Image (cartoon, rainbow, N blue to C red):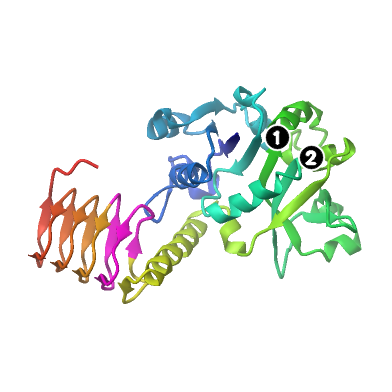
Amino acid sequence: MISAIVMAAGKGTRMHSDLAKTMHKVLDKPMVDHIYGTLKSVGVEHIVYVVGYGADTVREHMGDKVIFAVQQPQLGSGHAVMQADVLKGIKGKTLIINGDCPLITTETYNRMLACADEYPLVLLTVRLQNPAHYGRIVRDENGHVLRITEFKDCTPEEVKINEINAGIYCVDNELLWQYLPEIENNNAQKEYYVTDLVEIFNRHGHRVTAVVSDDPDEMSGINDRKELARATKWLQRRVNYSWMAKGVEIIDPETTYIGTDVVIGKDTTVYPGVRIEGKTVIGERNVITEGSYINNCHIGNNNRIIASRLSNAEIEDDTELGPWLNLVGDRDN
């Protein structure tokens, strides 16, 4: 059985917003939705969102799809995990995830889960040309992870390490709850850090390993509006290039925005400046011209949509719409 703990309690001060950080949209939907969809795609059964600031908004948005735990006050990542004690006693693997990291893919999580068949604790890491002041991943001669050393505590040799922690973990759930009480807050911030689990597992004789991400941008956390825009651009390109590989003609992928739940058939042509969102399904051999916006629509084959706005509409085959049509249907998604 696979469970997940999503740490989503932070306010996101640098967003300068009344909205909880994880409710900000990346491309077409909030971070919490992206994470939920990816977790379900890898077979996670129990998902616990640890909330704090803006908890009511997140609860209302997610409804009963997930389990909620409240972190108040917020005393570090280890303390956040401790609040998800509804998972105590469950056998299997648990993913521990930062709620502001919505770009991590199904493929990456599956790699971690596969490693967890052999290792009770798996970290997600990334190699950077300039790791700057990030904590370093210290491995032994066999490649097992010994500890995560904060930059200020690194030896001259450890400073040269370019592998850093992404803050995502896969852990044996029974061992997680057995060892969480050993995390201490004897630091300047008086907080509990989940990174301490690496040394705790090693101390108890468990081998720890790490999966290295192929794309550093996939690991990016979102802390301000600039990083939010950068994440949206990364996901926009990923989605657009995926559809292009399947036979959809996107004339300018840099100015075309297609949501992650959209489905498009081959030989459909999408012109620049088009936005397609929601659970839209578009068939084959359609043409969608500049300035069109399509949301939660079902569109058949061989249609031509010219600079029009369509919402909740059902369009059959061989139809020309627009220009400047504003059509709102009653399609139930």
The quarter of the rendered structure image containing the N terminus is top right
Comparing 322 with 75, the one in front is 322
The local secondary structure at tag 1 comes to helix
Front-lying residue, 306 or 93: 93
Relative image position of residue 212 (x, y in whole percent): 69, 59
The residue that mark 1 highlights is 78
Question: Which residue is the site of mark 2?
Answer: 196
Reading the chain from its start, which is encountered first: label 2 or label 1?
A: 1
C-alpha separation, residue under disc 2 versus residue under disc 1:
8 Å
Secondary element at image label 2: helix
Measuring 73% from the left and 32% from the top, which residue is drawn there? 176
The location of residue 69, given as percent across then percent down, is 55, 26
Helix, strand or loop: magenta stretch: loop
The magenta-colored residue range is: 257-279
The answer to whether residue 159 shows anywhere in this view is yes
42 over 54 or under it: above or below: below
Q: Quadrant of the C terminus?
A: top left
Dots 2 and 1: beta carbons under 8 Å?
Answer: yes
Residue at position x 18%, y 64% from top?
301
Note whether 325 is above or below 118 in the view shown: below
Give whichever of 50, 2 is nearer the camera: 2
Q: Is residue 96 left or right of 313 when viewed as pictured?
A: right
**Residue 260 falls in image quadrant:** bottom left
- Amino acid identity at mark 1: Gly
In this rendering, position of residue 149 left or right of residue 239: right
Q: Amino acid at mark 2?
A: Asp
